[in-house]
């Protein structure tokens, strides 16, 4: 999937806007389908960017001589 020209933050912000519009139930069906399609592309782009960032972090840890372990982040 090709990356959006938007930054991760802008893509995520747009995804939140789309979500609010769809949840409001005020857009016609055709427009809702277009918004849903745009949102799915943004989800893919954001997910890919997060995966790449995780890979870079793991490489940096390995290069620093640390062991790689995965743990859930605290919320």
Image (cartoon, grey):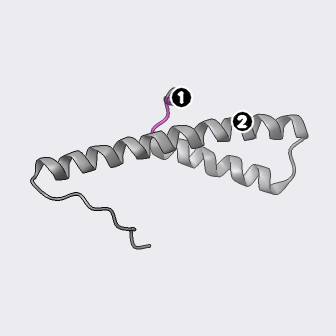
| Residue 57 or residue 62, whichever sits in front | 62
Residue 59 percent coordinates (x, y)? 22, 45
At a point 54% along the width and 41% down the height, the residue shown is 11
- What SS does tag 1 mark? loop
Q: Using the rendered view, name the quadrant where residue 30 is placed.
A: top right
Residue 56 percent coordinates (x, y)? 27, 44
- What SS does tag 2 mark? helix
Q: Main secondary structure of the magenta part?
A: loop
**Furthest-left residue in this view:** 65
- How much space separates mark 1 and mark 2, taking CA atoms? 14 Å
30 relative position to 43: left or right: right
At a point 40% along the width and 73% down the height, the residue shown is 74
Callout 1: few (<14), some (14-19), or many (20+) C-alpha neighbours within 10 Å? few
Q: Which residue is mark 1?
A: 1
**Furthest-bottom residue in this view:** 74
Q: Which mark is residue 37?
A: 2
Q: Is residue 11 magenta?
A: no
């Amino acid at each position: 999937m090709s990356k959006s020209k938007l930054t991760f933050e802008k893509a995520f912000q747009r995804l939140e806007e789309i979500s609010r519009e769809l949840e409001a139930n005020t857009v016609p069906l055709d427009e809702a389908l277009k918004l849903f399609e745009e949102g799915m592309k943004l989800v893919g782009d954001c997910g890919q960017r997060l995966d790449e960032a995780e890979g870079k972090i793991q490489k940096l840890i390995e290069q620093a001589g640390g062991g790689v372990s995965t743990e859930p982040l605290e919320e």
